Image: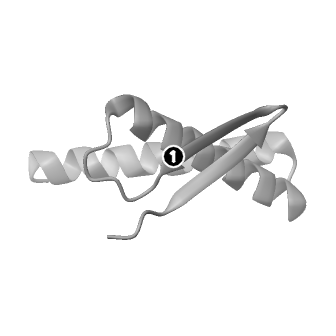
Amino acid sequence: MEETRIIITYGKKNIDVYLNNPDATTKELLKMQCCLVSVLINDMVIRGMTVSEALRNIRRSYKDAIKMYADDVSGK
């Protein structure tokens, strides 16, 4: 399987993770999540949202996703 990697540069530090690693550790998964959230915030701001609006949208989507997952696991 071909590796798909994302690299986020923050200052002089590069953060890179493989997006399709089936054996990813919790730390790697959290790095992926942080990279994705950074890209989402940046994209939303470029499209005209304020940072606070972007964060509000991301918080709402996380709450919805967690609720959907909890409902699915509990059989609701």
Question: How many numbered callouts?
Answer: 1
**50 with respect to 15 (left or right):** right
Q: Nearer the viewer, residue 4 or 59?
A: 4
Quadrant in which the N terminus appears? bottom left
Report x, y in % for residue 36.
59, 50
Whether residue 37 is situated above or below residue 4 in the rendered picture: above
**60 with respect to 48 (left or right):** left
Colour setup of the view: one colour
Q: Residue at x 87, y 47 (%)?
A: 50
Residue at the farthest left position: 75
Q: Nearer the viewer, residue 31 or 12?
A: 12
Q: Is residue 37 visible?
A: yes
Report x, y in % for residue 47.
86, 65
Q: Is residue 59 visible?
A: no
Q: Residue at x 58, y 39 (%)?
A: 34
Q: Residue at x 21, y 49 (%)?
A: 71
Crowding at label 1, few (<14), some or many (≥20) Cα neighbours within 10 Å?
Answer: some
Which residue is denoted by mark 1 in the rendering?
17
Report x, y in % for residue 52.
80, 39
